[in-house]
C-alpha cells in the first residue's frame, strides 16, 4: 500500500483502526492525546462506527476498554505515564482476569518532563503486572506493533502494553499500511467466572497468569522485534531498546559491535546469553529508567561490566538523543555555538484574555488579609499561577490533589484553605476529595476555574460541562455556598467580595468561575468563518 506520512501517535491510531478495534478509550494527556484525536477525525473510523469519545479519567477509560474486551471486541486504551497511576487498580487486576477480545494499553512516557510531573517508566508497570510489553523504535514499528499487540493479546489471553516516549510520539515518518483486519463478532467469555476476582477465583486466575510466563518468554525470544547481530569487536556489546535503537543507528558502524535490539518484553534471556558470549562488557541504551540495565545485572550475576544510566555512561535523567549515544560510544560530538547571553528564555504564560487571569486577580486581592501560603492548585493551565505576575499557588502534585491537600491543611489547622482546580480535573479526580471535605465539614473554599474544555491538552471535550453545580450539590455542598461568576474585569469587585465571604464561612464552599477558553473560542470562530 502507499506510504503515509504520520506522527508516531497517528501511526498507532491508524494501526488500531486497521487492526480491528471497535473502541478507543482515553483521557487527554500529552504526549498520548493525538492517538484518540486521530481516530476521532478519521473517516475510516467514522464509517466503521469505532467508539472514540473521551472518558472522565484513565481509570474509567481502562475499565470501559476491559468491558469491551469482555464482550469479545478489540479495544485500545490510551494515556500518558502518570495516567497509568490512575488506572493502575484496573490495569494490574486485568492481568489476572485476562482478556476476551484483544486489549491494547498504549502508554506515552515523557522523559525530560516536557509536560509532566515526573519521568516514570511504564515498563516497570508492565513487568509488575507480568504482561507483554512492546516498545517500537520507529513509526513503522509503532503502526505494526499496534496491530501485532491486539493479536498478541488474544493469543496470550492477556492485556498488552505498547510503550512509547515523547520523541517517537511527536516525530513524523512514512509508514506502509497493511491489510485491514475486520472487527470481532460479539462473543462472551467461555469461562463465565473469568472476570470475577473474588479470592477463591482470583487465586486460580493468578496461577494461570504465572503459568503463562513461560509462553511469554518463548514469544519474546522468538519475536521479530528482538534480534541479535554479532560483531567483530568484543568491547562493548550493545543492548538498544525502543527509540534508543534509532539513535544508535545514527552513530553505529555496521558490524563493529555485537548488538541486541529489544522491542518486546519480557527481556529475551536467550538473546542476552548470546550477547554475553560475544563481548567483554555491555552498554545498555534505553529511554527512561535503567529498566533493562537492572534486569541484565540480575541475570548475569557476574563480574562483566555493564554500562548505562546507573554507572554514568548515560545521564541518569532526561531524554536520550544521538549525541548522548555517540558520547557513550566514545565518539567525538561537535557542538554548535553557545547561545548568546542576550537571548533570554521566555517562561510560559496564560493566554491574553484567559479567564484564569481574572480569577487569580480576584483571589489575590481576597487573600491579602491572610498570612502564609494557603492556595493549593492542580494540574492544568492555571498551574501557571505559580509564575509572575500572580505567584499565588503553592502546590501542583497530581490530578485532584488541590482539594484533598486543602482539606488536609485545614485539618491541620491552616484555616481557611483554598483549592484551585479546573473543570475537567474536577470531574477527573476532584469529586471524591470534595465529598471528603463535605463529610468532615472543613473550612475550605474550592475554586473551580471552568473554561469548558480540557484546554491544556488542546481543547478536548470536558466531562464537567454543564454539570458542575449539580455535582457539587449532589455530594452535599450547601447550594447557598455554590456561587458562579463570569471571570471578567468588570466583575472583579463582585468576585473578590464572594471569595472573602466564603473564606469567612465555616464549612465547604464552591465558587465556579466560568468562561470559555479563549483558544477553543477562537478555533470555533475560525471554523464558522471558514
Image (spheres, rainbow, N blue to C red):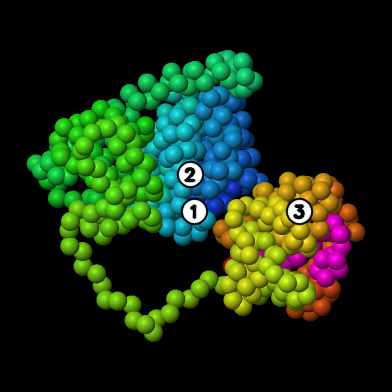
* Residue designated by label 3: 411
- Say which residue appears at 49% left-offset and 53% top-offset: 118
Query: Counting other residues with Cα less than 10 Å from the Cα at mark 1, is it few (<14), some (14-19), or many (20 or more)?
Result: some
The residue identified by callout 1 is: 118
Residue 369 appears in the figure: yes
Which residue is nearer to you in this view: 437 or 431?
Answer: 437
* Discs 2/1, front: 1
Q: Quadrant of the N terminus?
A: top left
For this orientation, the residue located farthest to the bottom is 342
In the rendered view, would you say 456 is above or below 400? below
Q: Which residue is mark 2?
A: 107
Q: Which comes sooner in the sequence, label 2 or label 1?
A: 2
Q: Which corner quadrant of the image does residue 417 belong to? A: bottom right
User: Which segment is the magenta one?
Assistant: 499-519
207 left or right, relative to 265: right
Q: Secondary structure at mark 1?
A: loop
Kindly indicate whether the residue at mark 3 contacts the one at mark 1 (C-beta within 8 angstroms).
no
| 3 and 2 marks in contact (CB < 8 Å) | no
- Whole-Å distance between the Cαs marked 1 and 3? 28 Å
Residue shown at 38%/51% (left/top)? 168
Badge 1 or badge 3: first in the primary sequence: 1
Mark 2 Cα-neighbour bin, 10 Å: few <14, some 14–19, many ≥20: many
Mark whose residue sits in front, 3 or 2:
3
Amino acid at each position: 500500500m502507499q506510504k503515509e506520512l504520520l506522527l508516531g501517535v497517528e501511526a498507532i491510531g491508524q494501526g488500531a483502526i486497521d487492526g480491528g478495534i471497535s473502541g478507543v478509550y482515553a483521557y487527554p494527556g500529552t504526549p498520548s492525546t493525538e492517538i484518540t484525536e486521530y481516530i476521532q477525525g478519521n473517516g475510516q473510523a467514522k464509517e466503521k462506527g469505532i467508539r472514540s469519545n473521551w472518558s472522565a479519567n484513565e481509570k474509567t477509560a481502562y475499565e470501559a476498554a476491559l468491558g469491551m474486551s469482555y464482550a469479545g471486541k478489540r479495544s485500545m486504551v490510551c494515556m500518558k505515564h502518570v495516567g497509568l497511576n490512575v488506572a493502575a487498580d484496573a490495569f494490574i487486576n486485568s492481568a489476572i482476569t485476562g482478556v476476551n477480545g484483544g486489549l491494547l494499553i498504549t502508554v506515552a512516557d515523557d522523559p525530560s518532563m516536557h509536560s509532566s510531573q515526573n519521568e516514570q517508566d511504564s515498563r516497570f508497570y508492565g513487568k509488575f503486572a507480568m504482561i507483554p510489553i512492546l516498545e517500537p523504535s520507529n513509526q513503522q514499528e509503532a503502526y505494526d506493533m499496534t496491530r501485532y499487540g491486539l493479536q498478541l493479546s488474544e493469543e496470550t489471553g492477556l492485556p498488552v502494553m505498547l510503550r512509547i516516549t515523547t520523541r517517537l510520539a511527536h516525530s513524523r515518518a512514512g509508514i506502509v499500511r497493511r491489510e485491514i483486519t475486520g472487527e470481532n463478532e460479539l462473543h462472551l467469555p467461555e469461562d463465565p467466572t473469568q472476570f470475577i476476582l473474588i479470592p477463591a477465583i482470583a487465586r486460580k486466575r493468578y496461577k494461570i497468569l504465572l503459568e503463562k510466563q513461560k509462553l511469554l518468554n518463548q514469544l519474546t525470544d522468538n519475536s521479530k522485534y528482538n534480534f541479535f547481530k554479532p560483531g567483530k569487536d568484543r568491547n562493548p556489546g550493545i543492548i538498544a531498546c525502543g527509540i534508543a535503537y534509532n539513535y544508535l543507528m545514527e552513530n553505529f558502524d555496521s558490524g563493529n559491535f555485537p548488538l541486541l535490539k529489544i522491542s518486546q518484553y519480557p527481556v529475551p534471556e536467550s538473546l542476552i546469553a548470546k550477547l554475553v558470549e560475544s563481548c567483554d562488557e555491555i552498554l545498555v541504551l534505553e529511554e527512561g529508567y535503567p529498566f533493562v540495565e537492572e534486569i541484565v545485572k540480575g541475570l548475569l550475576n557476574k563480574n562483566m561490566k555493564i554500562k548505562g544510566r546507573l554507572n554514568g555512561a548515560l545521564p541518569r535523567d532526561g531524554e536520550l538523543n544521538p549525541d548522548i549515544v555517540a558520547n557513550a560510544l566514545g565518539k567525538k560530538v561537535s557542538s554548535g555555538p553557545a547561545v548568546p547571553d542576550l537571548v533570554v528564555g521566555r517562561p510560559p504564560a496564560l493566554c491574553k484574555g484567559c479567564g484564569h487571569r481574572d480569577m487569580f486577580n480576584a483571589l489575590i486581592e481576597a487573600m491579602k488579609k491572610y498570612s502564609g501560603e494557603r492556595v493549593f492548585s492542580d494540574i492544568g493551565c492555571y498551574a501557571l499561577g505559580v509564575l509572575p505576575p500572580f505567584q499565588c499557588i503553592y502546590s501542583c502534585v497530581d490530578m485532584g490533589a488541590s482539594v484533598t491537600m486543602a482539606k488536609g491543611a485545614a485539618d491541620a489547622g491552616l484555616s481557611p484553605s483554598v483549592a484551585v482546580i479546573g473543570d475537567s480535573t474536577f470531574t477527573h479526580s476532584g469529586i471524591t476529595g470534595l465529598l471528603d471535605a463535605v463529610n468532615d465539614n472543613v473550612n475550605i473554599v474550592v475554586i473551580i476555574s471552568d473554561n469548558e474544555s480540557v484546554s491544556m491538552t488542546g481543547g478536548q471535550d470536558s466531562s464537567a460541562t454543564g454539570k458542575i453545580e449539580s455535582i457539587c450539590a449532589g455530594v452535599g455542598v450547601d447550594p447557598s455556598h455554590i456561587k458562579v461568576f463570569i471571570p471578567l474585569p468588570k466583575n472583579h469587585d463582585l468576585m473578590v467580595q464572594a471569595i472573602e465571604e466564603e473564606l469567612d464561612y465555616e464549612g465547604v464552599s464552591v465558587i465556579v468561575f466560568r468562561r470559555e477558553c479563549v483558544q477553543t473560542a477562537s478555533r470555533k470562530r475560525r471554523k464558522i468563518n471558514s
